[in-house]
Image (cartoon, helix red, strand yellow):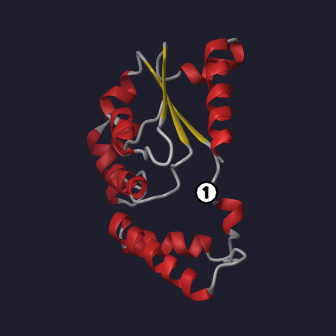
Amino acid sequence: MLIPTGITQSVLSTHIKKIQGILGDCVGKDQEKQIEDSLKNADIKDISLINQPSVLMAPVISGTRSAVPVPFIADLVDRLGFGVLPKPKQTYCLIKNSRLFNLTALISFSKDKIAQEAGTVRWLQQNLPNNPFPLIDEKLPGKHLTPLGWLRGNDQLADTVIQVITKLADRV
């Protein structure tokens, strides 16, 4: 991992141990090791969300049962190790313990039953950081798949995305 300019090895070491602690607490040792191995040779500037505006649109944090609606098969997929990772509880833990969501906006849709049932939007509204800036939270008319139709002329959605990204960029 390349070390950003101005950071001493001891500061970096302390930071890495803190991150490892969060990963271990949230996802467990096996998944922590997989993440560490995949990031071993990465340049942090190329993969980091730090100071990168992000828009969560129609977000749903869910597990294997959401992707595989037959409970028996979903449980089997999980037991065989092919299920959704990180699991919703792990994802919530990672978000809550991260400093990467300070430049995040939320766009949800009034008739999005999938997001409502999962409770993701409500959780994000309550848990995304409001410091140093308040969360940008827009609710538009539409359903869960509304973002897929923006190319066919959903001007309100396109305008909202542009406005939100502009507001986030001004915060950097």
Image spot of residue 115 (x, y percent) = 39, 29
Image spot of residue 156 (x, y percent) = 62, 14
Image spot of residue 145 (x, y percent) = 52, 22
Residue lying at the far left in this picture: please name it. Answer: 72
Q: Quadrant of the N terminus?
A: bottom right
The correct choice, above or below, for 10 with respect to 157 in the image is below
Relative to residue 158, is residue 67 drawn left or right?
A: left
The amino acid sitting under disc 1 is Ile
Residue at position x 61%, y 71% from top? 39
- In the foreground, 34 or 5: 5
The correct choice, above or below, for 29 with respect to 126 in the image is below
Q: Is residue 154 visible?
A: no
Look at mark 1 in the image and give the residue it sits on: 50
The correct choice, above or below, for 79 with respect to 113 in the image is below
Say which element carries label 1.
loop
Q: Is residue 1 visible?
A: yes
Residue lying at the far front in this picture: please name it. Answer: 132
Local crowd at mark 1 within 10 Å, few (<14), some, or many (≥20)? some
Residue at position x 45%, y 58% from top? 98
Residue at position x 57%, y 80% from top? 12
Relative to residue 80, is residue 100 drawn left or right?
A: right
Residue at position x 32%, y 44% from top? 73
